[in-house]
Image: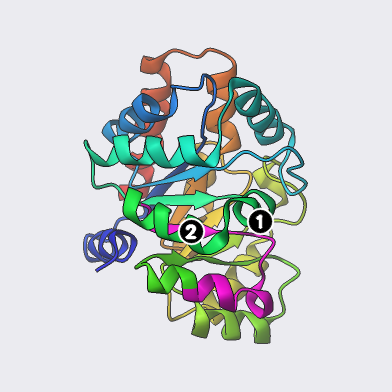
Amino acid sequence: MNRIDAVLRTLKEKREKALTLFVTAGFPELESTVPLVLELVRAGADIIEIGMPFSDPLADGPVIQESSHRALRNGITLKKILSQVIEIRRSTEVPLVLMGYLTPILSYGAQQFFSDAARAGVDGMILPEAPLEESEHYTDLAAGNGMCFIQMVSPATPAARMKIIDRHANGFVYCVSHTGVTGNSQSKTKIDYLRQVAKNIKRKPILIGFGISSFRDVSGIKKYAAGVIIGSALLTKLAGGEGKISIKRWISDIKEECRK
């Protein structure tokens, strides 16, 4: 069983919500990724999402854009990311999901990249530029290498389309909590929209992302999903040089809310 499926099944049996944390590979320093991921797992992360930096990250907010630009200046590449995944795998079985843009993957060679990623220990892939109608090739590549290809829904997704996505999804469905770029305020989340997602996505677990930054945010939305995804808030703390103890306490508070 894929590690993503196994972890989400175990958490469901425990009536616990999944905490997914997003990091940008190569940020804040080129060699930060491996020790950072291991620290996040020790702090309580159930799934780790690793961003693959790209020079033109249009769907990302200013925090993730800046982290990507900094990582590229540090010298991060797809090959380096996969080598970091291999290092992470030596110490933990936490599910690892790569998220990024198509251009670097096509330059690498999509078939080769999916194969190399699977061998490195990647469990899932998120490519926002490949919606359901254009993702069959990547879905097949993922499936052929034992990985999940994660589909996304947003407030612009009609109910009928949500049901279609649910039928084709594997791993989990990434619920974008509001329109716009990453990192916007959670206050923009529409509860009616989250109710609609929960009503129409029944086959696969739902993880809610975009704009979540505290245990209070999690408290307000957790009943509509199997878990949450937090990225920009964590990257902001890392960019600001916030200490390990403070970040660990912040993660622990959120994870405790996931257990309630």
User: SS of the residue at dot 2?
Assistant: helix
Q: Compared to 169, does 46 lie above or below? A: above
Provide the residue span drawn in magenta: 122-140
Query: Residue drawn 56% across and 36% down?
Result: 77
Judge by depth and name the residue closer to the eye, 240 or 253. Answer: 240
Residue 260 visible somewhere in the drawing: no
Q: How far across and how far down the image is residue 121, in percent? A: 32, 51
Q: Amino acid at mark 1?
A: Leu
Q: Which residue is mark 1?
A: 102
Q: Is residue 139 above or below residue 46?
A: below
Q: Which residue is mark 2?
A: 112
Q: Left of 8 or right of it: where is 99?
A: right
Going by the numbered disc 2, the residue's amino acid type is Gln
| Residue shown at the point (75%, 56%) measured from the top left | 179
Contact between labelled residues 2 and 1, with CB atoms less than 8 Å apart: no
Give the mark toward the camera: 1 or 2: 2
* Image x and y of residue 253, in percent: 38, 33
